[in-house]
Amino acid sequence: QVQLVESGGGLVQAGGSLRLSCAASGRTFSWYAMAWFRQAPGKKREFVAGISWSGGSTYYGESVKGRFAISRNNAKNTVLLQMNSLKPEDTADYYCAADKETSGLGSPGSDFGSWGQGTRVTVSS
């Protein structure tokens, strides 16, 4: 079982930047693909970005392509989400997720079985 703890959320003006961090513990972090999802009030959970176990492949939701970047530091058991050019529609609770299986790609169709408790991002206009 893996434990995931997100941090870095907050209030930012439109056009600004934030960096979210997810710290993982409880199993060998470097074996598993990771991802970020978000859920805005009244909306379905949305895939934001994913990264393969090795870090060699990344995936992004259409609404964040070109603005967000996911990365991982396997030595520190962390995955980051750099968010630039933020828009009010990026306002949501952001969740870190870990793949159930090893050696995954982190693509939207992956089976993410472990979730953090989320960190809130609010973008004001």
Image (cartoon, rainbow, N blue to C red):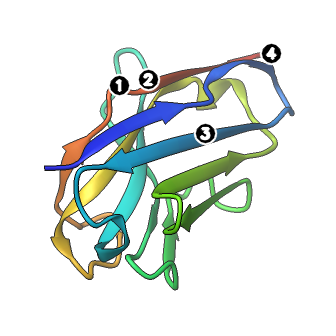
Residue annotated with mark 1 = 43
The mark that comes first in sequence, 3 or 2, is 3
Residue annotated with mark 3 = 20
x and y percentages locating residue 6 in the rendered image: 46, 34
The mark that comes first in sequence, 4 or 1, is 1
Q: Is residue 72 above or below residue 78?
A: below
x and y percentages locating residue 39 in the rendered image: 39, 29
Q: Secondary structure at mark 1?
A: loop
Q: Secondary structure at mark 2?
A: loop
Q: Is residue 53 above or below residue 82?
A: below
Q: Are marks 2 and 1 in contact (CB under 8 Å)?
A: yes
x and y percentages locating residue 68 in the rendered image: 67, 53
Amino acid type of disc 1? Lys
Q: Nearer the viewer, mark 1 or mark 3?
A: 3
Q: Is residue 76 above or below residue 90?
A: below
Residue annotated with mark 2 = 40
The mark that comes first in sequence, 4 or 2, is 2
